[in-house]
Amino acid sequence: MTPNVLFAAHPSRWTIYETPLRSAFAELGLSPHLAPDIPPAEVDYIIYTPNAPLQDFSPFTRAKAVLNLWAGVETIVNNPTLTLPLARMVDPGMTQSMTEWVAGHVMRYHLGMDQHIHNPDHLWVPHTPPLASERQVTILGLGALGSAVAEVLLSLGFAVTGWSRREKHVPGVIAHHGSGGLATALAQAEILVLLLPDTPATENTLNTETLARLPKGAFVINPGRGPLIDDEALLDALDRGHVAGATLDVFRTEPLPQAHPFWAHPKVTVTPHVAAETRPTTAARVIAENVRRGEAGEPFLHLVDRRSGY
């Protein structure tokens, strides 16, 4: 039987994803009925984004899975009508863009590039940075994205420490876990990268207490989730000089309000949530593979653990 695949992501995405999805299905020898307007009782798979109009999943009585186009699922994971298996997006294209963005900003801080890019007084102050092997980078979050970022930074020669809530093993990374491990990981972080999911357990991971554990002069890079940081605590650490600079790509409210202090702070770089975006061509292949697996009775990829929230 030909499966019915409902495209229930935000309507603006249909014209962007239709062709890549059909191509990805064809690559796997599949020809499902793919459309944005299939009656709920006839739907086998739901392609989804949390900002879509669909919020009540109870009419989809025969559906086998909800396949998210985003990595983040925090706004739908607790939807009481969503009892179907939920797969988050682990997109190779998105992973590559994240590693490029993080590597670029790590190198920027490592090399001290800002003092040369912004030098209105034309000061000639020679400074030779340490080698990458002499610079400690710490990554909070060793999931798919964190592990990929660690691999790239290791290839550049950086000494990489990681932390995760549960024990993880990433080749070449000194990995810590649990509450005790967080303190140890932070104490070594000359450059700190946040790649944790947004859950109640990770909110305000960086707060007054944890920021104080960073070495004086550390840099903070957050392409993960806005709620990971207590904004006021970070601003205070920046103003006191304990944190030397921060590059932030994600925020509690987006777009970042014009009046927010981050915009005007001389030690903060704001980027407009551009570190990682789902790429239609590569993401479509992930979706198609999960439909193939569902039809073959195989386990779905990247299923969300409802208890942990990701």
Image (cartoon, rainbow, N blue to C red):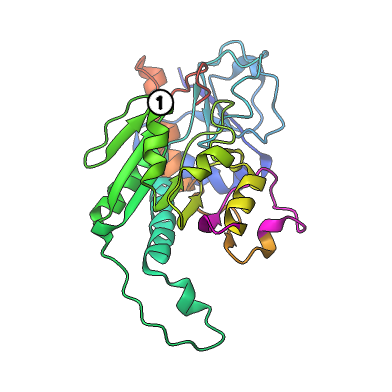
Q: Where is residue 79 in the image (x, y as percent from the top left)?
A: 65, 19
x 42%, y 63%: residue: 109
Q: Where is residue 105 in the image (x, y as percent from the top left)?
A: 44, 60
Q: In which quarter of the image is the N terminus?
A: top left
Of residues 238 and 143, which is closer to you in this image? 238
For the stretch drawn in magenta, the main secondary structure is loop
Residue 36 visible from this viewpoint: yes
**Quadrant in the rendering for residue 9:** top right
- Looking at the rendered structure, the secondary structure element under dot 1 is helix
Of residues 162 and 237, which is closer to you in this image? 237
Of residues 33 and 229, which is closer to you in this image? 229
**Quadrant in the rendering for residue 238:** bottom right
Q: Is residue 117 above or below residue 71?
A: below
Q: Where is residue 123 in the image (x, y as percent from the top left)?
A: 48, 87
Q: Is residue 148 above or below residue 123?
A: above
From this viewpoint, which residue is outermost toward the top? 61
Q: What stretch of residues is rendered in magenta?
A: 240-262
Q: Where is residue 205 in the image (x, y as percent from the top left)?
A: 54, 36
Residue at which label 1 appears: 178
- Residue type at mark 1? Gly
x 47%, y 56%: residue: 219
**Relative to 94, 235 lies left or right:** right
**Relative to 42, 220 lies left or right:** left
Mark 1 packing: few (<14 Cα in 10 Å), some, or many (20+)? few
- The answer to if 250 sits in the magenta stretch is yes
Q: Is residue 297 above or below residue 199?
A: above
- The answer to if 267 sits in the magenta stretch is no
Of residues 171 and 276, which is closer to you in this image? 171
Q: How many marks?
A: 1
